Image (tube, rainbow, N blue to C red):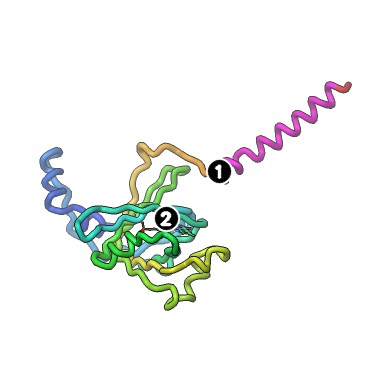
């Protein structure tokens, strides 16, 4: 179990809240320095086509941005390093600016179909893509490569899985198409049979 996540998140105020509402607070005593991602986490990340990136601004406001791309665009370089591409065009650079003063980030990855979610805590580093062009092929589609302006590296500290409760299963258009394919074929087959029967 990844205990560092709880060690970092069970702050004094959180423990106070737990004590107030439940009479006792969680105690984390055996946390490692960090929890590297395992095979299960790597597999889950490789299948994601989106995630949410939480950063903290210098005035203390949490900020969340949606990130999307082809499945696996958030690349697991090794058990403690993730990387993804940041594209030019949006001139706000909110995550980039936030990370420059506070490198702590929270990644939130959803699998709505299977009702699973993975949370990751880490330190982010934003790098000019011109200094790391070797990664561009790994993190972007061929037709998007010229738009990559920065690479965001995440040094993973820990992660946590949550239970499926309250997650409504949702399907992407591609997944719906995949499920509907055999049904469509069956309809075509039945319509053909109907036409044959009608002409008899
Ligand atoms: C041409 C273009 C393509 C983009 N493609 C993607 C993309 O594939 N995935 C993504 O998450 N954001 C994409 N974006 C958004 C940018 O990466 C954007 O900088 C980022 O979402 C803004 O982050 P911020 O809120 O931290 O400023 C694209 C933007 C432009 C202009």
Tell me: 178 left or right of 171: right
Q: Is residue 147 above or below residue 184?
A: below
Quadrant of ligand 1: it is bottom left
Pointer 2: what residue? 67
- The answer to whether residue 159 is seen in the rendering is no
Q: How far, Cα to Cα, is label 2 from label 1?
A: 18 Å
Q: Please report contact status of discs 2 and 1: CB closer than 8 Å, yes or no.
A: no
Secondary structure state at the residue bearing disc 2: strand
Name the disc covering residue 173, or none. Answer: 1
Q: Which quadrant holds residue 17? A: top left
- Residue at image location 28% in from the left, 62% down from the top: 98
Residue 33 location, x and y as percent?
Answer: 24, 67
Tell me: 175 left or right of 43: right
Name the disc covering residue 138, or none. Answer: none
Magenta region? 173-198
- Residue at image location 75% in from the left, 29% down from the top: 190
Quadrant of the drawing holding the C terminus: top right
Q: Is residue 76 above or below residue 17?
A: below
Label 2: how many Cα within 10 Å (few below 14, some 14–19, many 20+): some
Q: Is mark 2 within 8 Å of ligand 1?
A: yes
Label 1: how many Cα within 10 Å (few below 14, some 14–19, many 20+): few
Residue 103 location, x and y as percent?
Answer: 27, 65
- Residue at image location 75% in from the left, 33% down from the top: 189
């Amino acid at each position: 179990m990844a205990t560092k996540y709880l060690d970092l998140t069970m702050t004094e105020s959180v423990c106070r809240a737990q004590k107030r509402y439940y009479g006792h607070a969680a105690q984390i005593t055996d946390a490692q320095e960090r929890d590297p991602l395992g095979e299960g986490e790597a597999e889950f990340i490789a299948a994601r086509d989106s995630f949410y990136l939480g950063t903290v601004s210098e005035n203390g406001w949490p900020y969340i941005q949606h990130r999307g791309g082809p499945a696996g665009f958030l690349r697991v370089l090794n058990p403690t390093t993730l990387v993804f591409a940041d594209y030019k065009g949006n001139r706000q650079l909110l995550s980039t600016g936030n990370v420059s003063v506070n490198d702590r980030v929270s990644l939130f990855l959803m699998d709505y179909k299977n009702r699973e979610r993975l949370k990751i805590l880490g330190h982010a580093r934003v790098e000019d893509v011109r200094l790391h062009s070797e990664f561009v092929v790994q993190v972007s589609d061929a037709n998007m490569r010229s738009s990559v302006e920065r690479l965001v590296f995440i040094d993973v500290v820990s992660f946590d899985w949550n239970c499926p409760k309250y997650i409504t299963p949702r399907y992407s258009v591609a997944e719906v198409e995949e499920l509907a394919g055999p049904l469509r074929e069956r309809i075509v087959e039945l319509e053909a049979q109907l036409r044959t029967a009608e002409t008899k």
